[in-house]
Image (cartoon, rainbow, N blue to C red):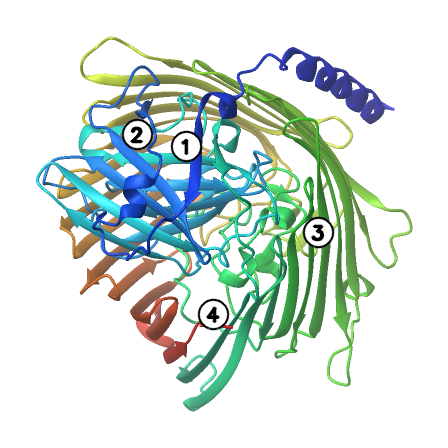
Amino acid sequence: MKRKVEFSLLMLLFIGFESSAQTAINFQEQFKLTIKKASSAIKIDGVLDESAWNDAEETAQFYRKWPNDVGNPNRQTYVKMTYDNQFLYVSFKAIDTNFYVAQTLKRDQTFLTSDAVAIAIDPVNQRTNGFLFAVTPYNVQTEDLISAGTSSDEMSFSWDNKWYSATTRHETYWIAEIAIPFKTLRFKEGKTNWGVNFLRNDVKSNEFSSWTDMPTNFPFYDFGYSGSLNWDTPPPTPGTNIAIIPYSSGSITKNNEDGSPAIAKISAGFDAKIALSSSLNLDLTINPDFSQVEVDKQVTNLTRFDIFFPERRTFFLENDDLFSSYGIPPIRPFYSRTIGLDKFGNKIPIAAGARISGNISKKTRVGMMNMQTLAKGDAAAQNYTAITFNQQVQARSSIKGYFLNRQGLEDKKHSFTDPLDRYGRNTGLEYNFINPSGKWNAWAGYHMSFKEMIKTPQYYTNAGGGYFTKQWNIIVDAGTITDKYYADMGFINRIDNYDALLGTVTRKGFNQLFNEIRHTFFPKNKKINQIRLGLENYMIFNLDGTFNESNHDVTLNIMYKNASNLIVKGGYNPNNLLFNTSFTDKAPIPPGKYRTATGVVTYMSDIRKKFSYSTTFGTGQFFNGTILQYEVMANYRVQPWGNFSVSVQQAKLTFPEKYGKSNLFLIAPRIEINFSNNLFWTTFLQYNNQRNNFNINSRVQWRYKPMSDLFIVYSDNYFTDPFMKNKNRALVFKMNYWLNL
């Protein structure tokens, strides 16, 4: 009954929000650009000397978006667009000095930290999803898929596709010339009105600007504030759109933990991208190999639960919001890293997979995925199926639903003694509301799980809302998850509770309540851009209504005009600990009531300088003991070819004598050398005594043709105690080739 009341109240709010938002400014009426077919052939060389560019319409002046949305930027940007039967062309002329901030020559690393220009395209023009293509003055490319649920922190730039660009640098400006194949985009045939925006990151001035007058409180890629790209005729149909990406690899591995001899292996496989229509894509993979994917950046975990790591494998990334955006952190019914990786990041072989994703109509997106893994050791083979849809309603809102199935496959060597391991199924439905201006958001979802031996479906529900303006950022969310709700293809970071004394794991459902209130000030002080003052509360209650745990944080963030940041944070954490918890090799901390207070100060220097750094210092109570922690990160940039950085973290936990002490170290040097825009060498070292692991990962990447690469990867793992005793090592060669048919 309680859940029915919550949903009824939310529906009333949705109706009120929607009716009050109809007066919102329609940016596509105010910002329009007409695109005409090219009157001459275009050569991508960074020189705009073709007559087609003289005939193309040019954008009006850009607006400042950061650090505030008042007036125009110090340096303007001018954009033109045209097309032919194969490519969409974009030219940028960025007024500038002859010095640029270029963090690296490495692909997919630059847009948020280097001087750059970008185009954000929404071919379906539903103001929710689209593509981002960016380039720096040194012609370093970055691209990504954008969805309504994407946050800046979640942007990985791991999606790759084929497109072309060239740049030229001059005394008072620089030019970027871009050609995007129509085959790279997903668009509805015959549609002559697309959403578009043009973006500029001018790091030297600490300014971000855009073609449309976008409010500073919204993400730079928010398609709700896109302009209108009007075609003189419908864009040409790409025709046959098939890409085959075969690969071959060889490896030599040695596992010293089990004393096995060195193993040499040669393998091959392929990926394929097949356009079923101009807006619907089929991805196939046979014997996929992800050995070239960068290792996860390790963190010191001071919680009692698992850490969420982002997906980096390319196959899972296109239109991944269709599958992965259900729920809210830290509860996600679908988490693609459950497929082909265990929770420690170890590989489980994938035999094959297929995925269909995209638009089947103007307002309907669908996704279907099936993946088959192989048996490995004691782990049985598994089949994973995911089906999802997203139906747009009203202006920017949506109703979406999914069905997930993990099916264990028994054989002579693998049988399931626990019936819960045989299969796991999930289904759910969500309503996400965004009013046309984007100021009001609301959401509600109901999710169920099905397991053998559990007679009634178990559920996870959540509902919430948000209000976002230039000065205010307000979020409220509430959710309930039962102890028998399983997400075999998802991530739930606190439902499994380990008792360090008994060595048992107990599942505990919970109710959660989260709220955040943040106010942004824009002082007239010449040294400060913004001041943000925030209050965040996260409260956990047991299903019977009794208190479990809460975190209450007050944060002050001062952003200076010189691009440095000062963050001061105070926290209070009441905790009714239910299970014995260990942070040392002594007696575990017993269940009971704990009240702790902590303070943390962080300073981040100006990243525009060749040498930049950040420091964090925190201290306070930690259960029945104390914590003293710090982190220092330093980076030296030899522009634009080299980055040399190191991160040092230490957390010293001190408890009463019976419970011992713990001194956790994480040291992570990183060396990145870019010999050109196509040849990169990255070496990443991570010493983590919490995981008793010292990892070396060194990777050479040669992009010998667009989207075609040769990788050489060396990895080595050692114990930290006993120090430098080798666990395993591997040397991998991989070569792929992108072939368009």
User: Considering the numbered disc 2 on the image, is that residue within a helix, a strand or a loop?
Assistant: strand
Any part of residue 366 in sight: yes
Residue farthest top in this picture? 524
Instruction: Of the two numbered discs 3 and 1 on the same chain, state the one appearing first in sequence.
Output: 1
Q: Secondary structure at mark 1?
A: loop
Circle 2: residue type:
Phe
Q: Nearer the viewer, residue 356 or 583?
A: 356
- Residue 220 is labelled as 1
**For mark 3, what is the residue?**
487
Q: Amino acid at mark 4?
A: Phe
> Splitting the image into 4 quarters, where does residue 562 fall?
top left
Q: Residue 122: x and y, percent? A: 52, 40
Nearest to viewer (mark 3 / mark 1): 1
Q: Position of residue 478 (x, y in %)?
A: 67, 27
* Mark with earlier residue (2, 4): 2
Residue at mark 2 to residue at mark 3: CA–CA distance: 40 Å
Task: Give x and y (percent) for residue 21.
Answer: 62, 15
Q: Which corner quadrant holds the N terminus?
A: top right
Mark 1 to mark 2 CA distance (whole Å): 9 Å
- Element class at badge 4: loop
Looking at the image, which residue is at 88% across and 57% down?
Answer: 453
Residue 284 shows which numbered tag?
Answer: none
One can see residue 112 in this view: no
Q: Which residue is mark 2?
A: 208
Horizontal relation, residue 499 to residue 707: left or right: right
* In front: label 4 or label 3: 4
Contact? badges 1 and 2 (CB < 8 Å): yes
Q: Tell which residue pokes out farthest to the right in this image.
A: 455
Query: Which residue is labeled 4 in the image?
Result: 290
